[in-house]
Amino acid sequence: MTDTDRQQHPARRGSKARRALGVGLGVLALVGSLAACSEAKNSAEGEPTPTPSEVPSAIPSEIAAPTPSMRPTDLRKVTCEYRKDDTGSPAKFVGFPPKRLPRSVINAKTMTVRTNLGNIVLDIAPGDTPCTINSFAFLTSKKYFDNTVCHRLTTVETNGLGLLQCGDPQAKGDGENPTDGTGGPGYLFADENLGPQYARGVVFMAQAGDASNSNGSQFVISYTDENAQLPQAYTPFGIVRSGMEIVDKIVKGGVNTAKDGVDITSDEGGSNAPKTKVLIKTITIS
C-alpha cells in the first residue's frame, strides 16, 4: 500500500459536480458502540493518520458551523439547519427535512437497509447525530433511496481502504458511468460526532476532507479496521448490528474497474463499482 493510497478517502467532492467519496473515497458514539469504537481506535494506534490538508480538496457551497458533538440533554430542543446545495451537483430534491426532530426520530434505534442481497441493520443514536438521523428519516419517508444502487467499492489491495459507498440516487453502479458519486438530495448539512475512528462495521457520511459540513445523502460502510487511518472528518452515525456477511459477500465478488484500469478520481465523478450488484430496495428507520 502506498502513502498515496493511504491518503485516499471517502469524499463528497466539490466542483461543478460534487462527488461523494470522490478522489479516493467520499463512528459513531452509540451507547455501547462507543466502547467498540474505542477498542478499534486503540488497536489502530501506531498507524499514521492523514490530516485533512493531505487529502483531496473540494469546495463546499458554504461553510456552516458544525452541530455541537456534545449530547443534548433534550432532543426536543435541537434545531437542525439544512442549506441549499448550490454547487450544481445532480440532485433528487424531495424538499428539506424539518428543523425540529419529530418524536419518531428522537425515539429511533435502528436503520435497516433492505437490499437485493438481504438486510443490513444499523444501530443508531439520535443523541449523537440528531441532524444526520433526521435527514435520513426525512429522505426515507420520501422513498429517496428506493431502488438505488451502491456505486463504489474499494479494497485494501487497490485503494488502501475497504469501503462500500451508497446513497447517490442517480448512480448506475457499473464502474463506467462518469457521474456516479456526484448525486445528492439538493441540500447540505453540518458534521456531527467527529472523533471515533472508522473501524469495521462503522457507517459514516461521505464528504471531502476539506469540504467540512457538506453532508448530503451518500454514506459509507466500513468493512475493515484499515479505515482507522482516515482523518476524523466524516460523520459516523451508525454501526452494523447484523448483515456484515452481506458486505463481505459483496467484497468477495470483486470490483468492476473503470476502463483505464484505475479508480476514477476526477472531480467530474465516476468510480469503481462492486461486481455484485447491490440494489437498495428501501431504507427504514425505527
Image (cartoon, rainbow, N blue to C red):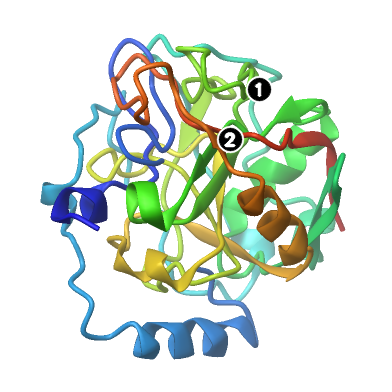
Callouts 2 and 1 close, C-beta under 8 Å:
yes
Q: Residue at x 45, y 72 (%)?
A: 225
* Above or below: residue 149 compared with residue 207: above
The one nearer the camera, 121 or 104, is 121
* Above or below: residue 193 compared with residue 21: below
Query: How far across and down, in percent of the image, does residue 253 sit?
Result: 66, 45
Would you call the spot at circle 1 few (<14 residues within 10 Å), some (14-19), or many (20 or more)? many
Where does label 1 land, which residue? Answer: 169
Residue 30 horizontal side relative to residue 56, left or right: right
Q: Quadrant of the N terminus?
A: bottom left
* Above or below: residue 72 compared with residue 118: below
Q: What distance separates the C-alpha of mark 2 from that of mark 1?
A: 9 Å
For this orientation, the residue located farthest to the left is 53
Would you call the spot at circle 2 few (<14 residues within 10 Å), some (14-19), or many (20 or more)? many
For marks 2 and 1 on the same chain, the one whose residue lies earlier in the sequence:
1
Q: Quadrant of the C terminus?
A: bottom right
Count of residue discs? 2
Instruction: For residue 66, say whether it is visible.
Output: no
Where does label 2 land, which residue? Answer: 217
Query: How far across and down, in percent of the image, does residue 201 sit?
Result: 60, 68
Instruction: For residue 77, say whether it is visible.
Output: yes
